[in-house]
C-alpha cells in the first residue's frame, strides 16, 4: 500500500519550508539581511578566501629560539653565581641543548652543584666528574614552547588589529603553527613585513672604552657585545650586555615629527619610567643604545636625566618605517621569530570571476540534468527535478546555518551533487519500471520499487560519504570545503530523493488512482 | 509520451564471455599507467613539491609572455614557467622551489613583484615552503590509502569478502589509471586532484555496489542459474541505471569543465575521466572478477533472515 504516515508528510514539508527559510537570506545582499528583524534567519553562506579574495598565511613559531634564550640566560646566572661565590670554573657554555661548566677544584663541586641546582626550576642538574650540566626538563620545554606559541598568537592578533584588517581569523594549528586568514587582503606584503619582525627593543649603555680595532677583531671585555648599526650593518657598536630597560615596559608609542623628521615617541609604564630615569640620571654624557632585534637603531647621547618616563627615538626613519616601528612597539614583541610556511592570496577579481563561473556552470548543469530527467521519466522526472531543486535549497540552507565555508572546490562539489543526486531517483524509477514489467500494478510497483532500491541507495552513498569524511580529515583549506559540500549534498540528496519524490508520487497515486503507469 | 530509453528494455549483452578481453585491456592500462608514472613522473603542483605560483593579468592589453620571460629569467630563480591561462591577458607563472628555507621563497615572490611592478593585477599568489609541501604530500597519500581501506572494510562488512576483493581491484584500477592519465598528459597534479581521485573512488565504488547488490539479490532468487548467466543478467538489469547516472553526472561535470573557469579545470577533467573509467570498471572488471571466487549460494539461511529483517525495517520508512 502507498501508506505515508501523516507525521512524515508533515516532517517532509516542514524540512523543505525550513530549508527555504534558511536559504532565503542568500538571495539578498548583506545590507538587506542585516536590517531584517533578529528572529528571522539572516545568516548567509560564508565564502572562502578563494571566492571573496583574501590571504591565507601559515606561520611557524621558531620556538627553539625561546629555549636557546633560556639556556643563554642560565649561562649568565651560572657566571654571576659562581663569581659571587668565588668558585673557579672553565668551559662555560651551551652544548647540545644543555649548559655545561667544568669545576676544576674537587672540593667546590658539591657546593657549585647545590648553587646551580636552584637556578632554574624547570631545569635538571647533573654532575659527572668535574662537569656540571644543566638541561631543561621535557615538561619545561613543552611549557615554554606552548607559552611562546600562545603569546605569539596574541601578539600577531594585536599587530593585525592595529593594521585595521577586517575580520581576521587567527588560530593555532598543530603545536607550533599559526593560521591567519585575512579576507579582502590580496597583497599581504604589509602584514608579512609586520610579522617578519620580532620587535624586541632593549636599551643598553654604549661601552666607549673599546677601540675600533678591538671592535673589528672581536676583542671585547667581558659583559660587552658588538651589535651592528641598523642603518649600516658593516658598522659595529660596542654596548654593554646588561639590559637597562626593555621594550616590554612600554605602554604607548606613536609616530611623530621632530624638526621635520619622522620619529617615534614612546612612554614607559611606572616601573619602566623609574628605571629609565635612573639610568639617564647616572649616565649623563654617555650614549644609550636603542636596540631593536639585535641591531642598534640609534645611540643618542644622554644630555640630562629624563624623568618623565617618555622619550623619542630618532633613527633616520621614513614615515612608513616610523609608523611600522611605533605599531610594533605598541603591539609588543614576539617571543620568537615567525616563519611563513605557506601563503595563498587571491585577488578580488579572480574570486568574483570564480563565483560567476561557478554559478553559470551550476545553472547549466542543473538545466541539463532537469531536461534529461523529464525526457527519461516524464512525470516522475518532474518529481525528481522538484526534489533536486529542494536538494540545492537544503544544501544552501545547511551551509548557511552551519556557517561552513564555501570554496571553489565546494562549488564543484555542489555541481557534482547535482549530477549524482538524481542517482537515488534513477535507481528507484528503474526499479519501478522493472516491477511494472514483471506485471505488478502501479501502486504495488511503486511500493516495491522504493522498498527494494533503498538498501542499494544507502550502501552506495555510505561509500561516498566515507571518501568525504577522509577528505575532510586530511584535506586543508579549499579541499575541506569540497568535502563539506559533498557530505552535506549526500545527506540532503538522500532525504530529497527518497522522501520528497515519494511524497509527490504517493500524492499523485492517491489523487488519480491510475490503472496503468508510464515511467 | 514515449520516454527516452538510453538502454533498450530487455537488452541482453554478454559481458562475462568477453571478460578476458576486458582483463587484458585493463592490465595494459595499469601497466602503461605505472610505466608512464615511473618514466614521466607526475607534474606535481606547488602543493606537493613546493614553490611559487602567481596568476597575473596584464593591465595593458594581451600579456607579452616573451617579455615576462626575459624579465623573470634574469632574476636567477631557477626554473620559471610562464604560460597563458584562459585568456590572452592572463598568465600563470610558476617558479621552482627556491634553494634554502622558507624565507628564500618569500624573497623570490618579492623579486617577481618588484620586476612586474604595477603593470599587472596579481590575481593569485601562492607559495608553499618545503615543510608544508612534504606534509601535504603525505596527507594526500594517507587520505587515498585510508579511503580505499575504509571502503574495503565497509564492503566486507555489507557483502562477502569476494565482493570486497572485486570492488577493491576495480577501485585500485581506477585510481592507478587516473594517475596514469595525469602522467600521460602532464596535467598538474595538486591537492584538488587528490580530492578528485577520492571522489572518483567514491563514485566508482557507488557504481560497483549497485551492481553487486543486484548480483546478491539474484544469487538468492535463482539458486540454480549458471553463474555467468546470472552475472550477465545482473549487469543488464542495472545497465539502464548505470548509464543514466553516468549521463547526468557527466552533464554536470561537462558544464563545470567548460564553464567553471580555468582554476577548476584540472579537477573537472579528473572527474570526467573518473566517471568513464569508474563505470567501465564496475561492469567489466568488478562483476566478471566474481567468476573466479567461489560464491556461496545456497547455505545462506542465516544471512537471508537478517536481510529480510533489514528489509522490514526499511519498508517502514
Image: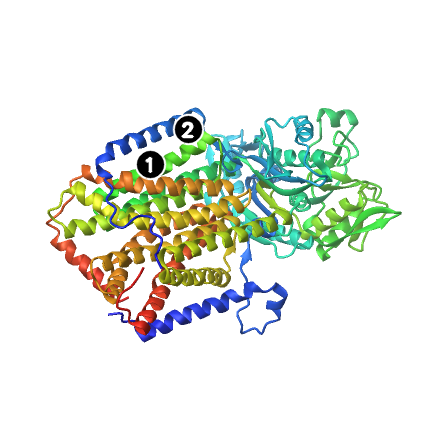
Residue A363 visible in the current orientation: yes
Q: Which residue has dot 1 on it?
A: B173
- Would you place residue A49 above or below residue A517 in this image? above
For disc 2, the chain is B
- Would you place residue B113 above or below residue A40 in this image? above
Cα separation between marks 2 and 1: 14 Å
Q: Residue B243 appears at what percent x and percent y?
A: 34, 47
Identify the element where label 1 is drawn: helix
Identify the element where label 2 is drawn: helix
- Would you place residue A228 above or below residue B258 in this image? above
Question: Which quadrant of the structure image shows residue A451?
Answer: bottom left
Residue A477 visible in the current orientation: no
Residue drawn where x is 55% and y is 67% of the image: A42
In-image side of A208 versus A391 (left or right): right
Q: Which residue has dot 2 on it?
A: B37
In-image side of B161 versus B62 (left or right): left
For disc 1, the chain is B
Residue nearer the viewer, A174 or A254: A174
Residue nearer the viewer, A260 or A333: A260
Amino acid at each position: 500500500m502507498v501508506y505515508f504516515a501523516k507525521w512524515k508528510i508533515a516532517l517532509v514539508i516542514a524540512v523543505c519550508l525550513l530549508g527555504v527559510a534558511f536559504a532565503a537570506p542568500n538571495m539578498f545582499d548583506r545590507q538587506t539581511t542585516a536590517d531584517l528583524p533578529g528572529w528571522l534567519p539572516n545568516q548567509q553562506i560564508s565564502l572562502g578566501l578563494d571566492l571573496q579574495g583574501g590571504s591565507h598565511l601559515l606561520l611557524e613559531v621558531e620556538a627553539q629560539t625561546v629555549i636557546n634564550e633560556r639556556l643563554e640566560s642560565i649561562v649568565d646566572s651560572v657566571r654571576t653565581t659562581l663569581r659571587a661565590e668565588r668558585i673557579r670554573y672553565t668551559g662555560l657554555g651551551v652544548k647540545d641543548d644543555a649548559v655545561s661548566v667544568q669545576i676544576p677544584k674537587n672540593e667546590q663541586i658539591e657546593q657549585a652543584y647545590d648553587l646551580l641546582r636552584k637556578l632554574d626550576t624547570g631545569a635538571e642538574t647533573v654532575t659527572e666528574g668535574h662537569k656540571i650540566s644543566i638541561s631543561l626538563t621535557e615538561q619545561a620545554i613543552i611549557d615554554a614552547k606552548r607559552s611562546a606559541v600562545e603569546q605569539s598568537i596574541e601578539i600577531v592578533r594585536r599587530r593585525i588589529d592595529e593594521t585595521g584588517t577586517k575580520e581576521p581569523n587567527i588560530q593555532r594549528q598543530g603545536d607550533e603553527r599559526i593560521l591567519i586568514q585575512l579576507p579582502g587582503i590580496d597583497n599581504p606584503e604589509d602584514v608579512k613585513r609586520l610579522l617578519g619582525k620580532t620587535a624586541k627593543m632593549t636599551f643598553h649603555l654604549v661601552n666607549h672604552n673599546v677601540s675600533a680595532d678591538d671592535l673589528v677583531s672581536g676583542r671585547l671585555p667581558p659583559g660587552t657585545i658588538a651589535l651592528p648599526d641598523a642603518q649600516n650593518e658593516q658598522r659595529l657598536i660596542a654596548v654593554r650586555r646588561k639590559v637597562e630597560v626593555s621594550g616590554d615596559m612600554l605602554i604607548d608609542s606613536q609616530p611623530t615629527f621632530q624638526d621635520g623628521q619622522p620619529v617615534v615617541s614612546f612612554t614607559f609604564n611606572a616601573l619602566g619610567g623609574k628605571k629609565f630615569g635612573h639610568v639617564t640620571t647616572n649616565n649623563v654624557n654617555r650614549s644609550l643604545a636603542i636596540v631593536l632585534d639585535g641591531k642598534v637603531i640609534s645611540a643618542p647621547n644622554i644630555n640630562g636625566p629624563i624623568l618623565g618616563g617618555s622619550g623619542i627615538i630618532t633613527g633616520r626613519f621614513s614615515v612608513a618605517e616610523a609608523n611600522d616601528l611605533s605599531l610594533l612597539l605598541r603591539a609588543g614583541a614576539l617571543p620568537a621569530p615567525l616563519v611563513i610556511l605557506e601563503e595563498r592570496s587571491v585577488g578580488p577579481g579572480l574570486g568574483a570571476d570564480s563565483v560567476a563561473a561557478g554559478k553559470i556552470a551550476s545553472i547549466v548543469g542543473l538545466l541539463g540534468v532537469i531536461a534529461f530527467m523529464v525526457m527519461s521519466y516524464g512525470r516522475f522526472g518532474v518529481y525528481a527535478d522538484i526534489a533536486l531543486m529542494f536538494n540545492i535549497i537544503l544544501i544552501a540552507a545547511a551551509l548557511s546555518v552551519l556557517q561552513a565555508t564555501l570554496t571553489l572546490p565546494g562549488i564543484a562539489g555542489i555541481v557534482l551533487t547535482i549530477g549524482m543526486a538524481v542517482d537515488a531517483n534513477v535507481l528507484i524509477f528503474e526499479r519501478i519500471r522493472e516491477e511494472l514489467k514483471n506485471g505488478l500494478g502501479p501502486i504495488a510497483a511503486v511500493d516495491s520499487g522504493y522498498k527494494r532500491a533503498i538498501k542499494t541507495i544507502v550502501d552506495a552513498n555510505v561509500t561516498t560519504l566515507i571518501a568525504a569524511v577522509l577528505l575532510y580529515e586530511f584535506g586543508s583549506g579549499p579541499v575541506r570545503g569540497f568535502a563539506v559540500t559533498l557530505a552535506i549534498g549526500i545527506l540532503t540528496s538522500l532525504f530529497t530523493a527518497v522522501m520528497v519524490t515519494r511524497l509527490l508520487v504517493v500524492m499523485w497515486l492517491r489523487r488519480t488512482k491510475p490503472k496503468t503507469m508510464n515511467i | 509520451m514515449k520516454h527516452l530509453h538510453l538502454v533498450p528494455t530487455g537488452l541482453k549483452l554478454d559481458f562475462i564471455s568477453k571478460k578476458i578481453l576486458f582483463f587484458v585491456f585493463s592490465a595494459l592500462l595499469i601497466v602503461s599507467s605505472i610505466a608512464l608514472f615511473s618514466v614521466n613522473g607526475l607534474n606535481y603542483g606547488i602543493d606537493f613539491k613546493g614553490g611559487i605560483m602567481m596568476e597575473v593579468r596584464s593591465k595593458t592589453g594581451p600579456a607579452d609572455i616573451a617579455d615576462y620571460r626575459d624579465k623573470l629569467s634574469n632574476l636567477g630563480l631557477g626554473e620559471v614557467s610562464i604560460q597563458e591561462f584562459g585568456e590572452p591577458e592572463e598568465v600563470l607563472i610558476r617558479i621552482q622551489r627556491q634553494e634554502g628555507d622558507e624565507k628564500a621563497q618569500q624573497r623570490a615572490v618579492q623579486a617577481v613583484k618588484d620586476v612586474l611592478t604595477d603593470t599587472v593585477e596579481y590575481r593569485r599568489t601562492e607559495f608553499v615552503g618545503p615543510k608544508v609541501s612534504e606534509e601535504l604530500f603525505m596527507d594526500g597519500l594517507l587520505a587515498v590509502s585510508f579511503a580505499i581501506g575504509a571502503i574495503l572494510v565497509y564492503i566486507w562488512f555489507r557483502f562477502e569478502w569476494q565482493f570486497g576483493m572485486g570492488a577493491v581491484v576495480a577501485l585500485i584500477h581506477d585510481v592507478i589509471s587516473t594517475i596514469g592519465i595525469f602522467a600521460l598528459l602532464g596535467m598538474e597534479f595538486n591537492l584538488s586532484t587528490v580530492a578528485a581521485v577520492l571522489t572518483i573512488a567514491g563514485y566508482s565504488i557507488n557504481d560497483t555496489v549497485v551492481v553487486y547488490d543486484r548480483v546478491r539479490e539474484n544469487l538468492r532468487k535463482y539458486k540454480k542459474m549458471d553463474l555467468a548467466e546470472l552475472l550477465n543478467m545482473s549487469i543488464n538489469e542495472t545497465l539502464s541505471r548505470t548509464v543514466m547516472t553516468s549521463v547526468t553526472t557527466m552533464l554536470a561535470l561537462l558544464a563545470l569543465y567548460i564553464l567553471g573557469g580555468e582554476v577548476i579545470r584540472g579537477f573537472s577533467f579528473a572527474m570526467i575521466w573518473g566517471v568513464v573509467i569508474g563505470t567501465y570498471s564496475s561492469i567489466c572488471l568488478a562483476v566478471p572478477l566474481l567468476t573466479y571466487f567461489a560464491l556461496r549460494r545456497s547455505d545462506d539461511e542465516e544471512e537471508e533472515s537478517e536481510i529480510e529483517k533489514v528489509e522490514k525495517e526499511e519498508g517502514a520508512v
